[in-house]
Image: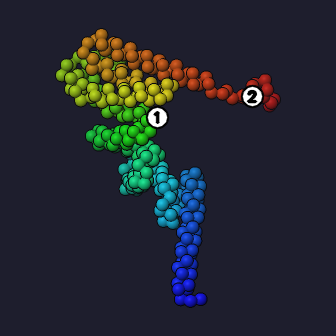
Amino acid sequence: MNRKALIVFTAAATLLLAGMSTGCKKLQARDNLNKGVQAFKNAKYADAVEFFNRAIELDPTYPTSRLYLATAYMSQYIPGADSPENRNYAQKAEENFKLVLEGNQKDTTALKSLASLAYQQANGMASTEDKLKQLDVAAEWYRKLSSVDPNEKEAFYSLGVIAWAKFYPAWMSARTKLGMKPEEAGPIKDKKVKQELSDKYEAIIADGIKSLEKALEIDKEYDDAMAYLNLLHREHADLAATEAECKAETEVANQWISKALETRKIKAERQPKTQGITSEEAPAK
């Protein structure tokens, strides 16, 4: 074999070996991914994290491993538990979901998970100020999700829930300070307090109602969305200018809760009834 042919042969052999090595790594990556999935299903999240990390090392181009890794971290996060380890779970989950989005900005699983994680973190925060800031983060992720998938009803529902979660503490605080009992009909009599609430929350409430109505356009039997429409309308009634307007909005709230209960009843009736053993068929003791 002449020198030129030897060079060509050596180069070809090197490429072949490199290809075989790459293929071998990809197979090993899939094997670690499968092991990680099995560990995850068995709630062995620490083991799952190790397998998923190994899969990523072997094949950084495969986004599924990164998505599973982020989910494994998130599954270990406990809202409200204030410890370095718990904060690390949330941080690692967020980092890896964002890395998934770097490769695919329209990955709905990553978007939904980031939104859900932010919402969980908000609910676990001690101060109202921190909670409201984190709710804003969650809302932003849900808006991105709804932009990527306009038929994602959970995104619009969650935006409605977040609007309620922002208004409810301020509404309750105002009623309590004014000595209003929970069953006492509105509107709020103190004009200054009512105006302050209206200035700060009117747009938030309107957006929340709009989002819940959008969720119902997607799923006309979304009873949870109906229940929150009831809450937002009922509490918003306290900001009405007159008693007549307050009563009218309270009636809208009543209609929504009635519809929610009716829809839940219809859904329950659709469920197949299990055929249990009757007392007559039961074996004698």
Residue nearest the observer in this picture, 212 or 264:
212
Res. 225 image quadrant: top left
Mark drawn on residue 277 = 2
Secondary structure type for disc 1: loop
In the rendered view, would you say 276 is above or below 112? above
x and y, in percent, of residue 69 in the image: 48, 56
- Mark 2 Cα shell of 10 Å, populated few (<14), some (14-19), many (≥20): few
- Mark 1 Cα shell of 10 Å, populated few (<14), some (14-19), many (≥20): some
In the rendered view, would you say 65 is above or below 1? above
Q: Which residue is mark 1?
A: 151
Q: Separation of disc 1 and disc 2 at Cα? A: 43 Å
Secondary structure type for disc 2: loop
Residue nearest the observer in this picture, 200 or 154:
154
Res. 166 image quadrant: top left
Extreme-right residue of the structure: 284
Res. 175 image quadrant: top left
Q: Residue at x 75, y 28 (%)?
A: 277
Q: Residue at x 56, y 21 (%)?
A: 265
Mark drawn on residue 16 = none
Left or right: 242, with 1 as reference point: left
Q: Amino acid at mark 2?
A: Ile
Q: Quadrant of the N terminus?
A: bottom right
Q: Amino acid at mark 1?
A: Asn
Do the residues bearing badges 1 and 2 touch, measured as CB atoms within 8 Å? no
Q: Residue at x 30, y 10 (%)?
A: 244
x and y, in percent, of residue 97 in the image: 42, 52
